[in-house]
Amino acid sequence: MDVTRRPFRVDWTGWTLAHLLDIRWQGYDPGRDVLDGAYRWTNPRLPVSVASFEN
């Protein structure tokens, strides 16, 4: 999928920023980096019920 068309979780912005700065650490999860091929959208866990994450 084209990276510009991927759903993006703004709360995971730090993972993409770390990728761009070439920063890695133990526990780094490329699945949270929108620029990585392993990135997968997952619904955030919220303390309130949300009917849908779609518009």
Image: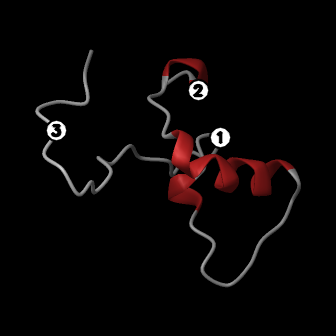
Circle nearer the N terminus (2, 3): 2
Residue that sits furthest to the top in the current view? 55
Q: How many marks?
A: 3
Closer to viewer: mark 2 or mark 3:
3
* Amino acid on which the number 1 mark rests in the picture: Leu
The residue lying at 16 percent from left, 38 percent from top is 50
Q: Nearer the viewer, residue 9 or 3?
A: 9
Q: Position of residue 23 (x, y in %)?
A: 83, 66
Q: Secondary structure at mark 1?
A: loop
Circle on res. 50: 3
Q: Quadrant of residue 54?
A: top left
Q: Is residue 54 above or below residue 13?
A: above
The residue lying at 50 percent from left, 34 percent from top is 8
* Amino acid on which the number 3 mark rests in the picture: Val
Where the C terminus falls, by quadrant? top left
Mark 1 to mark 3: distance in Å?
Answer: 27 Å
Mark 2 to mark 3: distance in Å?
Answer: 26 Å
The residue lying at 33 percent from left, 48 percent from top is 42
Q: In this figure, which colouring scheme has been used for the structure?
A: secondary structure
The residue carrying mark 2 is 3
Circle on res. 35: 1
Q: Nearer the viewer, residue 26 or 49?
A: 49
Q: In this rendering, would 25 be left or right of 29? A: right
Label 3: few (<14), some (14–19) or many (≥20) C-alpha neighbours in 10 Å: few
Q: Secondary structure at mark 3?
A: loop
Circle nearer the N terminus (1, 3): 1
* Amino acid on which the number 2 mark rests in the picture: Val
Q: Position of residue 43 (x, y in %)?
A: 29, 46
